[in-house]
Amino acid sequence: MAEAVVTPAEYAKEWQRAALRVLEAQKDTVGLSYSDLAARTSMARLTVYRYIRGDRAIPLPELVELCAVLGLTIEGLASKVTLAMVAPPPLPETAKGREPGPTAGLAAFTDLDLAQELVRRLRRARGSGRRAAERGERLPEHDRADEHRDDDDAEQERDRAAG
């Protein structure tokens, strides 16, 4: 089965959509309205709304300001977006009588939780590639490069032990 090819432009658009979902979820988690965000930043309410809803691109200085008001760092935002793109967490029970959105509960994760979950999932995915190789299945190109690196490491170990 052929792997789906994602272009850099498609990946960037998906990353941006995920970032907006994370910002929206964080806004809801801290209990701020668009008017509250505007009052705490140097931006108009309609501008904040357009940024977070994706109607307008967010310049970096404004993104930093929004993140600060929402209690995020740029690194924290990137961690949450990356995890949301790898595999979104399960949706929590409905909160306050509302149906949960696609990123409900995402803001409750700490940056450390997100990083640990991402590492765990990446290790599991990499392990499945090695198991596929043991069964004689074809590996994706990037896994074959890792396989050669592992062979080189083993060869260097043998040379050190012999020398």
Image (cartoon, helix red, strand yellow):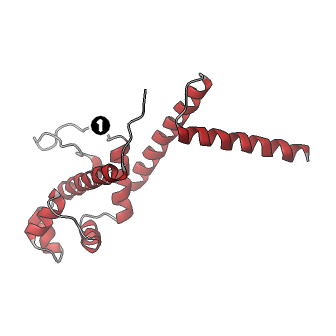
In the picture provided, is 140 more to the left or to the right than 20?
right
Residue toward you, 153 or 21: 153
| Figure quadrant of residue 51 | bottom left
Residue toward you, 123 or 136: 136
Residue 147 visible in the shown view:
yes
Name which residue lies at 14% across and 60% down. Answer: 55
Which percent across, then down, holds residue 6? 36, 44
Residue 110 visible in the shown view:
no
Which residue is farthest bottom?
A: 42
Give the residue at mark 1: 90
Which percent across, then down, holds residue 129? 54, 32
Which percent across, then down, holds residue 149? 67, 44
Name which residue lies at 31% across and 49% down. Answer: 10
Which residue is farthest top?
A: 135
Which percent across, then down, holds residue 111? 39, 55
Q: Secondary structure at mark 1?
A: loop
**Quadrant in which the N terminus appears:** top left
| Figure quadrant of residue 75 | bottom left
Which residue is farthest right?
A: 163
In the picture provided, is 97 more to the left or to the right than 92?
left
Neighbours of disc 1 within 10 Å: few (<14), some (14-19), many (20+): few
Check the image and report above or below for 140 versus 65: above
Check the image and report above or below for 65 versus 140: below
In the picture provided, is 55 more to the left or to the right than 159?
left
Amino acid type at circle 1 is Pro
Check the image and report above or below for 70 versus 4: below
